[in-house]
Amino acid sequence: MHFKSVTRIEEIVNSNTKEFRELFYRIYSIRSCVGELILPKKIEKWAREKFGNCEKQKIVRLTNKISGESTLFNELRAKRPFDAKSDFSIKVEDCAFCDPENRTPSDTFGRVIGKHCLTASNIAKYDCIHAVVVFKEHDPFVRSKEVIEDIFSVTQKWINKANKNNPTAKYPFFMWNCLWKAGASIVHGHAQILLSEEMYSKPLQFRRIRDEYKIKYSSDYLEDISYIHETLGLGKKYGNVKVLAYLTPIKEKEILMISDDFMSLADPLHKVLNAYYSMGVKSFNVAVYMPPIDEKDLYILRIVDRGNISNKTSDIGGMELYAGVSVVSSDPFVLARKLN
Ligand SMILES: [Zn+2]
């Protein structure tokens, strides 16, 4: 039996109905090519062992024409095993987050204290209203749904409290960087919340895309994206939450979730995190695009694997920063199978 793979995306899409193809190609474009090279004798054996048959490499570029997101997949890279094991210790000599009430600052409007976490004021702020949600457990690999629910509920309470204190700040942003590859400077499990007076650029861009799409096509962008993913076998529903193995991932194993409310994201997030851990993921970023305060809209969660923790190389280079195209090894079709 042939499993679906991203390097055969064109075939997969074209085997669907005309209506589906029209919608797919309205949003996405596919470019594929074969990269060729000649191996000198001296490295032939080594190269074949490391990369397989690398003299001809099929490369597929998937672009979301509406959002501008674009990803390059290389057949050779996509064939590499998903599960990476790495050994390292999360022990820390002297961890301030293990004693947060005494060793982290509080916001001027106080703390929000939950069962599994509490808020601190970020000591070196990205923006004026910036909190840290310090988890009770030092271990950053949260596995339980209950803990994530508590983190989300504390986050919601903090947002309300911070907004009461600063009524002009209306735009919440939640993020969770796990370990140093994801940009975390502290090992102890923690998430972050910001409340700004102006929406941050990516959530704003996302909003504009949705608005413009509605005007241009009289259709809902996220509904259409979800329908495409579901039809291709890349989307699933957990309760009311749509979970997509994203076709144009920013980096490895990116998943996008769409929900009517914040709390409903806790269950699918805990499932995805446990699937991530079982694939050997140790470092990840989670972000939630939230509607402005007093506005009803969708919550969009994105989560991405930041690569092997023991690898010194950064997963983000010039292609991602300046070409605006992500080079990704993980195949969304393989990811979708792992999630099932
Ligand atoms: Zn700690």
Image (spheres, grey):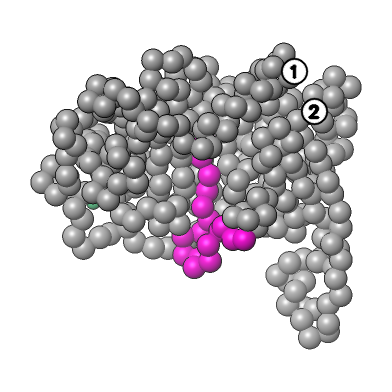
Give me the disc on residue 217: 1
- Which part of the image, by quadrant, shows the C terminus? top right
Return the residue nearer the eye: 63 or 150. Answer: 63
- 312 drawn magenta: yes
Q: Position of residue 48 (x, y in %)?
A: 77, 71
Give the residue drawn at x 46%, y 45%. Answer: 285
Helix, strand or loop under label 1: helix
Up/down of 148 relative to 210, above or below:
below
Badge 1 amino acid: Tyr
Whether ligand 1 has any atom under 8 Å from the Cβ at mark 2 is answered as no
Give percent across and percent down for residue 14.
88, 32
Q: Residue at x 69, y 47 (%)?
A: 71
Q: Earlier in the sequence, mark 1 or mark 2?
A: 2
Q: Which residue is mark 2?
A: 26
Which label sits on residue 288?
none
Where residue 258 sits: x, y (%)? 54, 25
Q: Is residue 137 left or right of residue 256?
A: left
- Disc 1/disc 2 C-alpha distance (Å): 10 Å
State if disc 2 and disc 1 touch (CB < 8 Å).
yes
Q: Disc 2 residue type?
A: Arg
Q: Position of residue 59 (x, y in %)?
A: 80, 54
Farthest residue to the bottom: give it: 42
Horizontal relation, residue 267 to residue 251: left or right: left
